[in-house]
Image (cartoon, coloured by chain):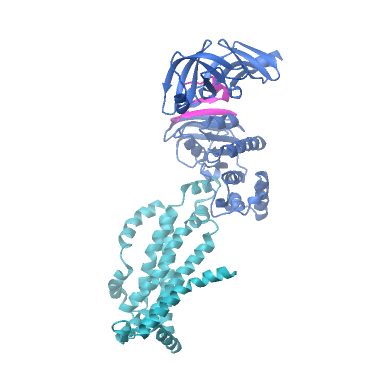
Chain colours: A cyan, B blue
Amino acid sequence: MSWLKKFRLGWGIVPIAIFLGIWETVARLNLIPGHFLFPPFSMVVVEFYYLVANGVLGDNFLSSLVRVLIGFSTGSVAGLLVGTVMGWKDVVSKSLSPIVSLIYPIPALGWLPLLMLFIGINEALPITIIFICSFFPILYNTATGIRTVDKNYIQVARTLGASDMKILTTVVMPLALPNIFTGLRLEAGMAWRVIIAAEMVAIPTGIGALMMKAESLMRIDIIIVCLIVLAVMCLSFEKFFAFLEAKLTSQWS
Amino acid sequence: MPSIKLKNISKYVCQNVNLEIFDKELLVLLGPNGAGKSTLLNIIAGLIDYEGSVLFDGDSVDQLPASKRKIGYLFQELTLFPHLDVAANIAYSLKVQKQARSEVQARVEELLQMMKIKHLSSRYPRQLSGGEKQRVALARALALAPNILLLDEPLSSLDVQASKYLRMELRQLHKRLNITTVYVTHDLIEAEEMADRIAVIESGHIEQMGKLEEVFFYPRSEKVSDFIGAPNILDCTYCYSLGRGMVEVGCGGLSIIIPDDGNTVKRIALLPRDIYISETKPPGPDVNRFKGIITDINTTDETVRLKVKAGENNLTAEMPHHIFQDMDLAVGKEIFLILKLRRIRVYDNKEQAKENA
């Protein structure tokens, strides 16, 4: 890597370093009213170390991660399947579209009171919320992606002897990938935002619950640790799908 | 290769169309946009429902889906699969037919060489030029050795030079493969260069069908004449060979020199756009330059059309507005006509030529 490239890569860290420097200075010099609640960045790092060392952060993070992974993967797969059928078959689209259009705009957390009564407060609750949060947007993006594939490609494939199933799997699905990945990328981050909110309101374990406990103890340093974990996870999930999308489509899209 | 027959086909603008395409011939469907040319291709390919019947070699294929009609179809929009590289695009039909890997590779290799695109095999469509895309699309359409080739304005997106070159190649390819081909275009020059026969289609009706010169010299209706450029058709009263590859023909008091192709010339056609007008005597030898008198001036949105009396002929000449405005032309004015030698179309009497021989 040339020195110029290294310099450009390192340049991105500068704003973060400046931000952390200002944060540390402002907190240390008590420049914010109510300063006793606002810890410097170094204290947050120390608290992060303690939370990792005593296993509190690890346990809660794992609880959230498992919920996100189960809810997101089942919701995505279901959304992909139903979205594919809806995008491919007009009759299915026409039958399901009114229901989807009605339910899709409801925020995932809007389901929480209803699901608390139906499912109760247990592990299934956050997983179901994440499922709903992932299912509809991914369904919508998949169906749109498949529906908007240029019909000429389908006609060409037909004249080249391909069956409907072959056309779907070898032409339509690959060409719908950019749309599908848009849904996956956005919802991967959204799943973390929603799980935190669900855990804050209704679940006693997980990063969201840890934040609520920290709030009751006025431990801003712990809250900030949780927020940083949340930011990193949102970003990582989104970046993972962006990477996957680039890997699969960058050569041709 | 099969002959194709369309019997009482109705779909969209096309109503009760009957059309026969002979075995191994290249038929050009010539007509303006919206005339129903692509609709007929899609019907032959089985891509859309229709009323009537399509027969390949006398057998109805109405119940056969597109995937079973053994047709190579080159679409106007150059629809190469963007997610597949050139080799994979060409191999697509072979793979979906589950041919052995070695066979697929061999056939792809053969087509890459035939279309002279071997160096492009690992490129993606977005990395190709218009002409290269066209070659790949053609190779892909030919991969399964189809019985019929349908070409829907395949050169419309190319520049003039590339289009001319590919036309020549397509013609050679057709001769080599001997494949029944239907070529759709709205371009008369393309039609002239490609066709064994031409079918002029307008508003879903086949207005006229036949060899190029039949259509050109004996347009059956004003619509056909208009579409092919409303040529001036002149009967020739004599035809003398001048040697050096030239003949002189007499048409209504005008002696016109044209290239000699060894046959007796019966009629000639001059497109209005191929007749130049000059206010002064043009320089150069006094060949294919005639005095005339303007009898009428007709202005359309696109051009200005002049009726000119030259000898006993009433010729129509055409010029762009800006040139007309630069000249001082009026009805009754004497002007000079210049005929472009290479643009004069000739109707031969081949039978008579044979007799003379």
**Image quarter of residue B239:** top right
Residue at 46% across / 49% down in the picture?
Answer: A150
Q: Magenta stretch: residue B221 in it?
A: yes
Residue A21 seen in the figure? yes
Q: In this rendering, is residue A171 above or below A189?
A: above
Which residue is more in the foreground, B326 or A27? B326
Which residue is more in the foreground, A244 or A24? A24
Q: Where, quadrant-wise, is the C terminus of chain B in this rendering?
A: top right
- Residue B236 in picture, x, y percent from top left: 59, 13
Which residue is more in the foreground, A220 or A205? A220
Residue B69 seen in the figure? no
Q: Give the magenta part as a residue range.
A: B195-224
Q: In this rendering, is residue B192 above or below B146?
A: above
Q: In this rendering, is residue B121 above or below B309?
A: below
- Residue B146 in picture, x, y percent from top left: 60, 42
- Residue B38 in picture, x, y percent from top left: 48, 37
Q: Where, quadrant-wise, is the N terminus of chain B in this rendering?
A: top right
- Residue B271 in picture, x, y percent from top left: 53, 23
